[in-house]
Amino acid sequence: MVALAIFSLAALAMVRLQGYSVRSAADLGESGLAWQVARNVAVEILSNPVPPTLGETSGEETNGGQVWRWRAESSRTDDARLLRVDIQVTGTGKAGRRAAQLTIARPVEQ
């Protein structure tokens, strides 16, 4: 009887651990999607022949079946040849808790 009680406690702990692992994997996947959106926005900014205007721009992207909102803020740096661009991505819906932030330096002229 005691052995059965000890086994059931161990089994319950394993079930809880499995649930936590599944949730963590899902959260990690959503965070990866947020980072992918941030990198995609950075590539668009870096590959555009026209430098971004100073100030804030924003938009939405669909990735992984979810809508992600992004905001890019361009500002001057100490080096007149470079612009600093801070990119922030936040999820909507079930990915609302997920976010990513990325900073890049973009040449003014290419």
Image (cartoon, rainbow, N blue to C red):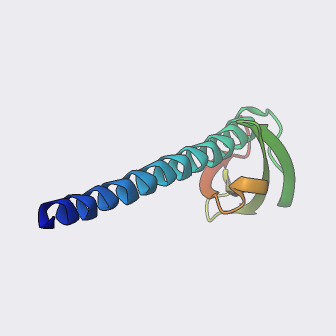
Q: Residue at x 81, y 42 (%)?
A: 61
User: In the image, 51: left or right of 46?
Assistant: right
Residue nearest the viewer, comparing 12 with 32: 12
Q: How many marks?
A: 0
Q: Is residue 54 above or below residue 25?
A: below
The answer to which image quadrant residue 97 occupies is: bottom right
| Quadrant including the N terminus | bottom left
Could you tell me residue 89's position as x and y percent?
Answer: 71, 55
Q: Give the left or right position of residue 102, taking residue 85 as reference.
A: left
Say if 68 sits above or below 97 in the image. Answer: above
| Residue 12 on image: x %, y % | 33, 60
| Relative depth, front residue between 15 and 62 | 15
In the displayed orientation, state which residue is furthest to the left.
3
Residue that lies at the very extreme toward the front in this rendered image: 1
Visible residue check, residue 92:
no
What residue sits 51% from the left and 53% below the top? 23
Image point (83%, 38%), residue name: 50
**Which image quadrant for residue 33?**
top right
Residue closer to the observer: 56 or 7: 7
- Above or below residue 18? Residue 4 is below
User: Which residue does the image show at 86% across and 50% down from the upper left?
Assistant: 59
- Judge from the rendering whether residue 30 lies leftward or rightward of residue 89; answer left or right: left
Point out the image quarter for the C terminus.
Answer: top right
| x and y percentages locating residue 77 in the rendered image | 65, 63
Image spot of residue 94 (x, y percent) = 72, 54
Looking at the image, can residue 83 be seen? yes
